[in-house]
Image (cartoon, grey):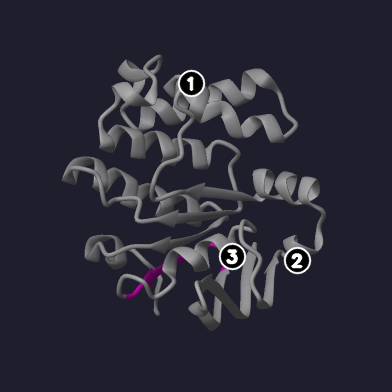
């Protein structure tokens, strides 16, 4: 597995001016790596993750995952590519408000072929691992902020992605649960994937194999 960003740039229109969010950034994540990204607020860390996750096309530069440019695919093919290759933990969770914990975790399987029983078993194992079995039928509004974040992490891991992209995944958790999340991506990377993590958490950075500063 390899994620390669080569000289990617992205600007946003803000009235009469352009805000340069990312400018000529190159990052590589190879099999088994846990790469942490740090930098001040507003330096483009979240934009970089969206670009890496095939969710936001850069103005210039190239993105490759296992040698394939996801932005060269049509929208449907790109969505299928994301579902099978990438697990994303969003800073704002983006859970479906009317679905239970179980159904939120299982939702990514809709875009990937596979046995329904195997998918459900993986989902239940992840829910148990993140200490959510007693919340399995709750909707997000009935969960604490930390519980929602754990649901988001379990959902990202459901399809056993080759690359995990995580935006501040420990920012809203107590110390015990934050430690559980910090350990899980590192273990996943060792198993064959790679992790690109945006974080301000020094303890998460301490687990990284490499740190990128923006």
**In the depicted structure, whether residue 103 falls above or below residue 203:** above
**Mark 1, residue position:** 99
- Nearer to us of marks 2 and 1 is 1
Marks 3 and 1, how far apart at CA: 28 Å
Whole-percent x and y of residue 166?
44, 54
> In percent of the image, x 17 and y 46: which residue is there?
175
Start-end of magenta stretch: 30-39
Q: Secondary structure at mark 3?
A: helix
Residue 189, given in percent of the width and then of the height, sits at 49, 56
Near-viewer residue (76 or 151): 76
Q: Which residue is mark 3?
A: 51
Distance CA(mark 2)–CA(mark 1): 33 Å
Separation of disc 3 and disc 2 at Cα? 11 Å
Location of residue 113 with respect to 181 vertically, above or below: above
Q: Residue 150 sits in which quadrant?
A: top left
Q: Secondary structure at mark 2?
A: loop
- Which residue occupies 45% across, 34% down? 95
| Residue 36 lies in the magenta stretch | yes
> Tag 1's secondary structure?
loop
Q: Nearer the viewer, residue 186 or 86?
A: 86
Q: Label 2 belongs to which residue? A: 69
87 up-or-down from 122: above or below? below
């Amino acid at each position: 597995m390899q994620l390669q960003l080569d000289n990617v740039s992205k600007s946003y229109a803000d009235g009469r001016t352009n805000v340069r969010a990312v400018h000529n950034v190159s990052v590589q994540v190879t099999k088994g790596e846990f790469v942490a990204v740090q930098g001040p607020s507003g330096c483009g860390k979240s934009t970089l993750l969206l670009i890496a996750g095939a969710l936001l096309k850069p103005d210039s530069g190239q993105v490759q995952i296992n040698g394939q440019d996801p932005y060269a695919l049509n929208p449907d093919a790109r969505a299928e590519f994301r579902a099978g290759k990438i697990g994303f933990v969003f800073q704002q969770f983006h859970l479906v408000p009317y679905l239970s914990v179980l159904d939120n975790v299982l939702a990514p399987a809709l875009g990937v072929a596979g046995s329904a029983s195997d998918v459900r078993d993986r989902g239940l194992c992840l829910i148990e691992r993140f200490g959510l079995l007693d919340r399995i039928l709750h909707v997000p509004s009935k969960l604490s902020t930390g519980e929602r974040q754990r649901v988001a992490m379990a959902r990202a891991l459901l399809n056993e992605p080759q690359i995990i992209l995580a935006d501040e995944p420990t920012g809203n958790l107590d110390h015990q649960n934050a430690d559980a999340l910090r350990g899980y991506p590192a273990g996943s990377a060792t198993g064959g994937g790679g992790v690109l993590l945006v974080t301000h958490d020094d303890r998460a950075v301490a687990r990284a194999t490499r740190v990128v500063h923006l």
